[in-house]
Amino acid sequence: MTLTVDNIYLGYGDTPVVQGLSLDLGPGEIGCLLGASGCGKTTALRAIAGFEAIDQGRILVGDKLVSTPALKLAPEKRSVGMVFQDHALFPHLTVAANVGFGLTRLKRAERQRRVGELLELTGLTGLDQRYPHELSGGQQQRVALARALAPAPQVLLMDEPFSNLDTRLRRRMGEEIRGMLKARGTTTLLVTHDQQEAFALADRVGLLRDGRMLQWDTPYQIYHQPGSRYVAAFTGRGSYLEATVDRQQLHHALGQSPLPEQRPPGQTLALLIRPDDIRPDADGRPSTVIARQFQGADILYRLKLDSGEEINALFPSHDDFAVGSVVGVRLDADHLVLFPADQAVSSSNRSNSVAS
């Protein structure tokens, strides 16, 4: 089933919260609204669920119109499931009763069969008679997911689904739940403030700022071809090098690169450098290690170039260089991302520094 959000606006009083939001999800796609607290992502999700009215635009689940300024279909009539941030499980009901809560219209045998299938799908078989307080955080999350999937919604919405879990469990739950949703072909939209979570779960990611969608794209494109400095900064570490156009070549402290598009000669630009764009190379440009951060399989370095500019570089941990070492490096980027040069170049370098 598809989900279409078409140019929606909503707010509270004179305060706009969501402004001109549009997105499309195809059958079985997983999308994510990503952004900082207060950017409007949860409000947008609540509007799709039917808990908030919209002031402009429209929302469709499949071909069914569920929201316009003149229409607000009740949540239970939208065929939309919702997993809340705090799970919202009924503490006085067992796991089985929680999962089957929305299936009261089914005959008892069919309800039990459906609950049993979902308990097996979510790895909860054998826990059906336990109560929420007797479960771990990850198990509670699975119960909330099973309950939302029980009525077979056409679209599933998830509000910060892993925010109450520790880092390791969040990663594992993310992998498991993505697999479950893909296996069932459930069209899903989630919201999170965690870039890694968004990239791991979603087929498409939309970054919001002040209620506006800045970019709606695949995780790869969002990271490697961000449409603005804000998107680049929010979705990963990055440094900027001053770059100058000369005869359709881009000259910078790491050498020169072919221009991806026509630019006026002499124009000065800011070249985005991701840590994984840098490779150690004995024949490359010299740099000095000024800080390093061991991360297990990788080491994140802060390097100072001969130009005085600083960049981050992520090398396998076998490439072990001490602070003060001189290391040859080269640029190895599939895509050059350029922004207008301004004072934000130096401030962006400072904000992405590596602790020594």
Image (cartoon, rainbow, N blue to C red):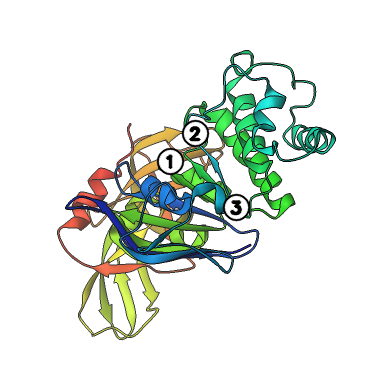
Q: Residue at x 64, y 20 (%)?
A: 93
Find numbered disc 2 in the image and state the secondary structure of the residue it sits on.
Answer: loop
Find numbered disc 3 in the image and state the secondary structure of the residue it sits on.
Answer: loop
> Does label 1 or label 2 sit earlier along the sequence?
2
Q: Quadrant of the C terminus?
A: top left
Left or right placement of residue 265 versus residue 184 in this view:
left
**Few, some or many C-alpha atoms within 10 Å of disc 1 (few <14, some 14-19, many ≥20)?**
many
The residues bearing labels 3 and 2 have C-alpha atoms spaced at a distance of 44 Å
Q: Residue at x 64, y 37 (%)?
A: 102
The residues bearing labels 1 and 3 have C-alpha atoms spaced at a distance of 46 Å
Q: Using the rendered view, name the quadrant where residue 71 is placed.
A: bottom left
> Does label 1 or label 3 sit earlier along the sequence?
3
Q: Which residue is mark 3?
A: 79
Q: Nearer the viewer, residue 190 or 273?
A: 190
Q: Position of residue 221 (x, y in %)?
A: 48, 64
Q: The disc labelled 2 sits on which kind of residue?
A: Gln
Q: Which residue is mark 2?
A: 295
| Residue 312 seen | no
Q: The disc labelled 3 sits on which kind of residue?
A: Ser
| Residue 108 seen | yes
Q: Is residue 31 above or below residue 354?
A: below
Q: Nearer the viewer, residue 301 or 33?
A: 33
**Would you say the residues marked 1 and 2 are in contact, meaning their CB atoms lie under 8 Å apart?**
yes
Residue placed farthest to the top in the image?
134
Q: Using the rendered view, name the quadrant where residue 216 is placed.
A: bottom left
Q: Which residue is mark 1?
A: 300
